[in-house]
Amino acid sequence: MAVLAPELVRGSNVFQLFRSLRIVNKGVEEVDEGLLQLHQLEELILSTNKISGINSANLPRTLKVLELCCNAVADLQDLCAHPPPELQHLGLGYNRLCSPLQDKYLTATFWPNLVSLDLSFNNFTDLMELVSQLSSLQKLRVLVLQGNPLVLIPTYRGFLVDSLPKLSFLDDIHIGPDERLQFHGLAKQPELIRNEARVVVSIGEIKGVPDPSTQQQLEVGSKAPVITYSYCVTYEFAEGEEIEDGSSTEVTKIHQSPTVATLDVDSSAQDTGETGGQQDPAATEEPKAHSAKVFVTPGKPWEDTIDCSYRKEHTVRDLVGLKSYLAAGTIVSVIEEKVLSWPVRADPEENAVTKGKAGRGKNKNRAKVPEPRDKQKKKKKAKPCEFRSDPPIRRTLGTQQVTLETLLATEDLVATVCDFGILVTEQPLQPPSLEEKDRKKQKDKSKKPKAEKKNQASRKTAASAKGKRKNKDTAELEEGQNLQPVPLTVQFQMQLLRWPWAASSQSQESVATTVEKTQ
């Protein structure tokens, strides 16, 4: 054009040629009236900038595509003052829009020709109110709402599909006739729309925990304690979780650090719950912005494969807090609990009184008739030994962060195996006793005269022994390869309940309630 018609690219004439303008990640904070010089502009891309608001009076009336993804837009009032009448796509993903103030600007009054609307990863929470506004957009075919708190509601997708019959794509997934048939009639049952989310956490097998019996130092004598080990898994969940009465799951508060969770005692903790914790040096680092609660699985004794068989359903009303929690992920830890139990001796005061009475009555009872054998047998029977348990000693065997952000998009399930690596255990060094030292010396003395005779015989058999040693070394090497240490792993799963699975459990609850009333 500069060669064939240079007059068209001189001065302000060049602005007449623009159809699309892309200014991405350039730190743009404001759109001024200079943009009105682009009389033929149809597409304006201003993604990843610092725009907090746009005055629609500065937008060309010919605009058909407006993309404002990844900015800081929190209010649509200025944008809707004089919006472009021919706009077909409006991209407002990854901004700061929230319910209920911004819902009223998403109607056909402002966007009569809108075909595509992206509201992903904002903070819309009121599903029914938003749908009532969007239903006026008769030309809307593509809608993206993933990443908003309202997508966590079990009936979210079904309610939208049935309420917007002309919609073709929801969250980048095509809406087919089978899906419409599945959710048919759901829009007429508003009582099923609850602004709450239901999440199920399941924890399966723990593998790779070293056998604690190999680490114990065996002590001789009655003073040695009885040591018991148990193992559990902890995970954190959103602070806004609604806890039902009678729940068998232990709950503790958490102050979250990037690597280790420090547990505080909760008054409602039960027998297997955490009652305290040793603070790791890493736990003194600056905590995360979001708060959460720690849930603890019941303690299990050591086995090669420890089956936790844990399942808990969480009901959350704070959808914004749940969104922040899922975006940050959860922390899963394997905890070892060691308890020392000591034998309890009889009370010293009791013993003194008994001895005193026995001394005073020693002479008096000499002439008495001997007691029956039955009573003597009863006296000889020893009382069962009682034990006093020390406070449990807890040790974190492994900690790992699990990413949950996909639950905010189109996924309903996150299933993973947390791999904490191979645990390095230190074997305690036991010094030999005096008896063992004496035995070793005696053996060494008796072996000296016989050593000379054995040297001659050993020289003859050295050649034949070499072949045997090679075979033995090969067998030991193969055995060592077969006994490779197993990494510490735990199965973790988090599922976001959707319709109709949530509906089936809800119907069961309603049936149970009805039965109780009739009884």
Image (tube, rainbow, N blue to C red):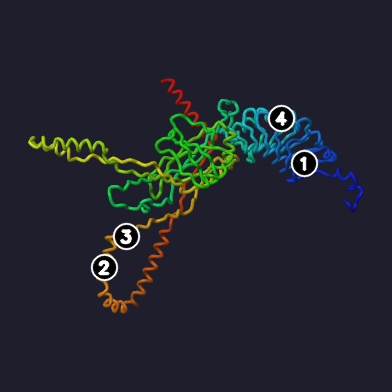
Tell me, yes or no, if residue 169 can be seen here.
Answer: no
The residue identified by callout 4 is 105
In this rendering, the label closer to the viewer, 4 or 3:
3
Q: Dot 4: what SS?
A: helix
Q: Which of pointers 1 and 2 lies earlier in the amino acid sequence?
A: 1
Q: Which of pointers 4 and 1 lies earlier in the amino acid sequence?
A: 1
In-front residue for pair 358/279: 358
- Amino acid at the residue labelled 2: Lys
Q: Which of pointers 3 and 1 lies earlier in the amino acid sequence?
A: 1
Q: Which of pointers 4 and 3 lies earlier in the amino acid sequence?
A: 4
The residue identified by callout 1 is 44
For disc 4, the neighbor class at 10 Å (few under 14, some 14 to 19, many from 20) is some
Quadrant of the rendering where the C terminus is positioned: top left
Residue 130: give x, y in percent of width and height: 65, 30
In this rendering, the label closer to the viewer, 1 or 2:
2
Tell me, yes or no, if residue 349 can be seen here.
Answer: yes
Q: Alpha carbon of mark 3 to alpha carbon of mark 1: how far?
A: 82 Å
Q: Alpha carbon of mark 1 to alpha carbon of mark 2: how far?
A: 94 Å
Horizontal placement of 214 versus 414: left or right? Answer: left
Location of residue 428 with respect to 288 vertically, above or below = below
The residue identified by callout 3 is 432
Q: Dot 3: what SS?
A: loop
